[in-house]
């Protein structure tokens, strides 16, 4: 594998439990602090020659902010037995996304053929052809007695990830990500905590093993579970068995879902392999519309600093810099006429003043004008200084929005952007 940069680490395997370079090669710059989310992306050569993984990496980049990228690690596992193919693909990733490898965002891992056991003579369940049984098992298991670790592809990824981030989500190498999927995941997990719901597995897609999220502390247990049953069931069946074994009875699904399968060509090496046209009907990429910010007046109970007025956050000319935020302080957006909402996004802070964010607050919608108590309801909580709220199409038109500070803070707040997406499909109904 070609060297990329002296700052990068072609590790001798410390993070892979002492696997030597003969078997595993990692291109990565490891961050000193634990991240929020590891995204596992196993990739294997398709017999048709189609390559999707570069587009999947680009989709992750397109759907994340710089703040997101600082807390996310995308781990690409090149698991094909064709060493030359793996080398070419890793070189392409380095060439196109080298600066994101430098930042610690992207890790590239190659696994050698010698790590795998013979995959012949496996049990044939579901009346599968022997080629499909071997392909399915390769996704699940790897046996190397010297290491006393039996992991390949998925299981190896699970063993790589525990010390990288707090949470781990699995996707495939032919996936499109919804815009803002990282804060969407964080908001959903926060809502589960508020509801005191115990969970082992959260689904952010309805398809196979795409968008399945676990705590990183459960990954080693799940890897061991796969090793027990790798000949019995495909991995997307086993993960549901694992969920139930961990005493999570019901599926917890986030809707709209955040990951969509876009590839057509299977990695299954049989002539009769059909195109995979499965789609997640609940997927919303978050980019179907642009904020149109209907006519409104913006006011605040907080003092504006040096001409950085509340209206600036809505018009996009500058931003609103608010002094002395107290518990109960508000920013109010009052529309000229009632508006049917589709989505509202409020972001705070900027690169020059990263600490000037709203630490604790809520976004509310009200039937009446600003600064009244008329029939307000909550759209969302601020997480890491922002809120991105999707609004049900059945919601009645609203006259105003309110950002309400729920805990006083010493730092000022930069309201960088207030973006309102109107439900244009319901135009004329208000």
Image (spheres, rainbow, N blue to C red):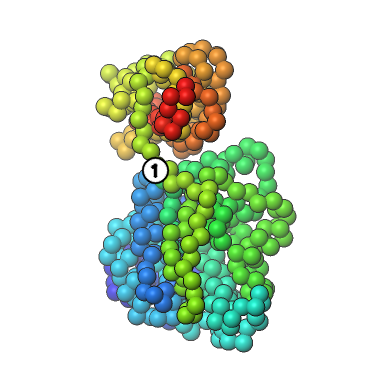
Q: Number of callouts in the render?
A: 1
Measured from the top left, where is residue 354 in percent x and y? 36, 36
Direction from residue 152 to residue 198 in the image, left or right: right
Direction from residue 187 to residue 74 in the image, left or right: left
**232 or 148: which is nearer to us?**
232
Residue appearing at x 59%, y 79% in the figure: 133
Dot 1 lies on which element?
loop
Give the residue furthest to the front: 428
Residue 387 in view here: no
Give the residue furthest to the top: 372
Whether 374 is drawn above or below 230: the answer is above
Residue appearing at x 51%, y 12% in the figure: 372
Q: Quadrant of residue 88?
A: bottom left
The residue to which callout 1 is attached is 287
Direction from residue 268 to residue 250 in the image, left or right: right
Measured from the top left, where is residue 271 in percent x and y? 47, 80
Residue appearing at x 43%, y 59% in the figure: 262
Measured from the top left, where is residue 267 in percent x and y? 46, 73
Q: Quadrant of residue 55?
A: bottom left
Residue appearing at x 57%, y 17% in the figure: 375
């Amino acid at each position: 594998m070609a060297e990329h940069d002296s700052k990068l680490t072609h590790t001798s395997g410390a993070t892979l439990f002492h696997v030597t370079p003969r078997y595993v090669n990692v291109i990565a710059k490891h961050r000193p602090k634990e991240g929020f989310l590891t995204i596992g992306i196993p990739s294997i050569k398709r017999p048709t020659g189609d390559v999707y993984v570069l587009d999947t990496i680009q989709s992750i980049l397109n759907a994340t902010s710089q703040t997101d990228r600082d807390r996310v690690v995308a781990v690409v596992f090149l698991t094909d037995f064709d060493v030359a193919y793996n080398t070419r693909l890793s070189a392409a990733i380095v060439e196109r996304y080298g600066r994101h490898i430098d930042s610690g965002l992207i890790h590239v891992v190659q696994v050698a053929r010698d790590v795998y056991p013979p995959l012949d003579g496996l049990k044939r369940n579901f009346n599968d052809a022997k080629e499909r049984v071997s392909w399915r098992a390769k996704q699940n298991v790897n046996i190397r007695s010297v290491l006393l670790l039996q992991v390949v592809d998925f299981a190896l990824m699970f063993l790589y990830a525990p010390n990288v981030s707090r949470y781990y989500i699995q996707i495939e190498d032919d996936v499109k990500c919804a815009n803002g999927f990282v804060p969407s995941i964080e908001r959903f997990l926060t809502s589960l905590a508020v509801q005191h719901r115990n969970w082992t597995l959260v689904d952010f897609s309805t398809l196979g093993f795409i968008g399945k999220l676990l705590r990183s502390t459960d990954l080693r247990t799940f890897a061991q579970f796969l090793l027990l049953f790798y000949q019995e069931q495909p991995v997307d069946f086993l993960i549901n068995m694992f969920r139930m074994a961990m005493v999570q009875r019901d599926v917890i699904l986030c809707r709209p879902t955040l990951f969509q399968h876009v590839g057509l060509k299977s990695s299954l090496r049989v002539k009769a392999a059909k195109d995979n046209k499965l789609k997640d009907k609940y997927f919303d990429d978050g980019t179907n519309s642009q904020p149109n910010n209907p006519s409104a007046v913006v006011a605040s109970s907080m003092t504006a600093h040096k001409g950085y007025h509340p209206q600036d956050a809505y018009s996009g000319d500058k931003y609103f810099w608010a002094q002395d935020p107290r518990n109960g302080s508000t920013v109010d957006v009052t529309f000229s006429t009632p508006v049917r909402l589709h989505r509202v996004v409020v972001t705070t802070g900027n690169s020059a003043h990263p600490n000037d964010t709203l630490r604790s607050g809520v976004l509310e919608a009200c039937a009446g004008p600003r600064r009244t108590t008329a029939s307000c309801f909550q759209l969302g909580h601020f997480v890491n200084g922002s809120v991105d709220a999707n609004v049900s199409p059945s919601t009645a038109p609203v006259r105003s929005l309110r950002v309400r500070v729920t805990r006083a803070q010493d730092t000022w707040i930069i309201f960088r952007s207030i973006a309102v997406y109107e439900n244009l499909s319901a135009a004329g109904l208000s």
